[in-house]
Image (tube, rainbow, N blue to C red):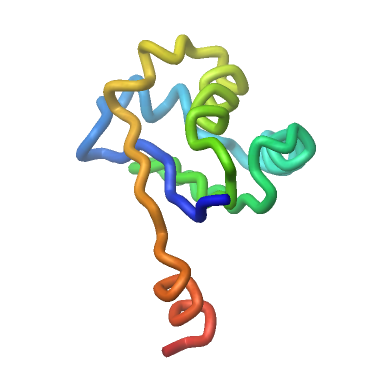
Amino acid sequence: MQLLTLGVNHHTAPLAIREQVAFGPEKLAQALQELTQSQRAAEVAILSTCNRTELYCNTPSPEEVTLWLADFHDIERRELAPYLYTLPIPWSSARRRSSGR
């Protein structure tokens, strides 16, 4: 399993793409439940604002989470891929942040 950030932001994607992958309040609970139940990610947090959408996940396959994101928003993966970033989160960094150090 990998702890990672996967998303788009105002530096990486045009507004049209950011709007397509945004999670409104009415879709957020469904998205979290669907992604964790699909077993593509064990733990998930979603941050979606006007400037970015990021998924923080514990997953064995970042590619599967990317596919899920594209499918959930009914966007072609090849249309989304050029704008998407995936960043690993080191466990030591996550532990420090969660403990307030």
- The front one of 76 and 90 is 90
Residue 40, given in percent of the width and then of the height, sits at 66, 36
Is 75 left, or right, of 43 in this rendering? left
Is residue 55 something that shows in the picture?
A: yes
Q: Which residue is located at x 45 percent, y 78 percent?
A: 97
Q: Quadrant of residue 74?
A: top right
In the displayed structure, 4 sits above or below 16; it is below
Is 10 left, or right, of 49 in this rendering? left
Q: Quadrant of residue 27?
A: top right
State the residue lying farthest toward the left.
11
- The front one of 97 and 93 is 93
Is 44 left, or right, of 80 in this rendering? right
Q: Quadrant of residue 13?
A: top left
In the displayed structure, 72 sits above or below 98; it is above
Q: Which residue is located at x 43 percent, y 49 percent?
A: 5
In the displayed structure, 67 sits above or below 65; it is above
Is residue 26 something that shows in the picture?
A: no
Residue 24, given in percent of the width and then of the height, sits at 59, 37
Q: Which residue is located at x 54 percent, y 22 percent?
A: 67
Residue 6, given in percent of the width and then of the height, sits at 43, 42
Q: Where, quadrant-wise, is the C terminus in this rendering?
A: bottom left
Q: How many marks?
A: 0
- The front one of 74 and 1 is 1
Q: Which residue is located at x 58 percent, y 52 percent?
A: 58
